[in-house]
Amino acid sequence: MTRCTRTKRSSSSSLGQAAEATGGEAALVAEVGGLSFTDGPLDGGTWSYEVYAEDAEGDDSAPSNEVDVTISMAPDAPSGLASTWDAVTKTWSLSWSASPSPSCIGYRIYSSGGEEVLELGGMPYATMALTSWSRQFTNESGTYLVLVRAYDAAGREDANISQVACIGLSGGAAVSLAAEPRLVGAQLGSV
């Protein structure tokens, strides 16, 4: 029988401080009859593993070398998306609170381009490091849905569908800022 233990370490802890950093002993995560096992799902962070072999009498061997596994996650979503319309300049402005994730390096703005449905998974309309975005209109008409997502240096982005703003335009004038976005399959639509 082979047993494996797992301990979550903080990013600043050393190998000798692993159990202390998580507030306790390493947890038994597997007892297998073979030479491998799969663990998960796990939160992002660094996880340390040790393996022990058990003999026929039930005695444990000395632990293996400790192996660290680091799991990177997409950044958390931004929050508090707010929308304003300036009728004089025909400018729609959005602002939001930054993602709390230290790995976040910027935001991707996805736009429906005047359609009532925003296809999820398309190319971003804009990419920026700031927590605000604006677009000036001329004589456009239609429903504009905009989704804001955080991303990291590896290109991973949050999967939120809640940080969405919507505006209805007719001849470049705002007719509605209050349309309620809704999820339709793999699309966002306006109500």
Image (cartoon, rainbow, N blue to C red):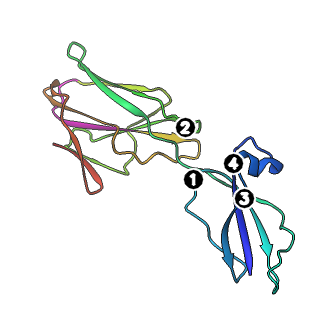
Q: Position of residue 107 (x, y in %)?
A: 46, 35
Q: Earlier in the sequence, mark 2 or mark 4?
A: 4
Reading the image, the residue beneath label 4 is 22
* Measured Cα–Cα span from mark 1 to mark 4: 14 Å
Reading the image, the residue beneath label 2 is 101
Camera-side mark, 1 or 4? 4
Q: Earlier in the sequence, mark 2 or mark 1?
A: 1
Residue at (48, 45) in percent of width and height: 157
Q: Which residues are magenta?
A: 138-148
* Measured Cα–Cα span from mark 3 to mark 4: 9 Å
Reading the image, the residue beneath label 1 is 43
Give the amino acid type for the residue marked by disc 4 in the picture.
Thr
Q: Secondary structure at mark 4?
A: loop
Give the amino acid type for the residue marked by disc 3 in the picture.
Ala
Instruction: Give the side of residue 68 with respect to residue 75, left or right.
Output: right
* Measured Cα–Cα span from mark 2 to mark 3: 27 Å
Q: Position of residue 130 (x, y in %)?
A: 47, 26
Q: Quadrant of residue 21?
A: top right
Residue at (83, 78) in percent of width and height: 59
Give the amino acid type for the residue marked by disc 2 in the picture.
Ser
